[in-house]
Image (cartoon, rainbow, N blue to C red):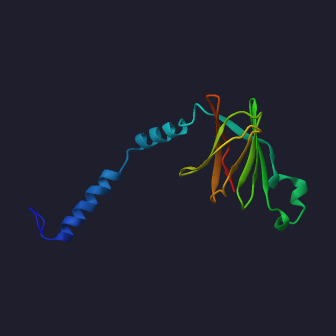
Amino acid sequence: MSGPGWESDEVLLRELTEALAEARTVPPEFAEAARAAYTWRTVDAELMLLTSYDSILDAELAGRARAALTARQLVFDAEGISVQVEVTEAGVAGQVLPARPSRVTLLTASGPAEEAEVDELGCFLLGPPPPGPVRLRIETDGTTVVTDWVCV
């Protein structure tokens, strides 16, 4: 196949590759604006901070053999809500306090991984989290809160 000005397919492919490379060049101000917009994607959600407890940072537990530890325990707090979580190889078990009708979503960097309803006691159960950073999104009473990112 050849077209006007192209001696061979190789020339056509080379010119096409060059054209696509030029099209992928994003002006720095566009990239900066995109990053700024991305940081605002959860502006309506209150951030729950890992403020109360992370068993991996517990000095008493650090003295024990790490091989004996089978679960990681985390507590996230925000104004008026707390989420207690235990992460094991079997999955993620947690409780939202105070208990209220809610929906919990396990989020990864690539998006939602799993969702669960919170029962009348505030408890929820999710499957094993994928490796890497994860966070929880809790939606309740028209309010959305998200936890810090945690590597599990």
- Seen at 82% across and 68% down, the residue is 67
Where residue 131 appears, as percent x and y from the top left, is: 64, 60
* Residue sitting at x 78%, y 55%: 72
In screen coordinates, is 51 left or right of 15?
A: right
Work out whether 124 lies above or below 129.
above
Q: Compare residues 27 and 145 and report the one nearer the observer.
A: 145
Dividing the image into 4 quarters, which one contains the C terminus? Answer: bottom right
Give x and y (percent) for residue 70: 80, 62
Judging depth in this view, the residue of 128 and 8 nearest the camera is 128
Q: Residue at x 64, y 51 (%)?
A: 134
Q: Specify whether 130 is left or right of 9.
A: right
> Who is closer to the viewer here, 98 or 15?
98
Quadrant in the rendering for residue 47:
top right
Number of marks:
0
Whole-percent x and y of residue 117?
65, 42
Q: Residue at horizontal 27%, vertical 60%?
A: 18
Name the residue furthest left: 4
Q: Residue furthest front?
A: 120
Residue 106 position in % (x across, y down): 63, 48
Of the 4 image quadrants, the one containing the N terminus is: bottom left
97 left or right of 14?
right
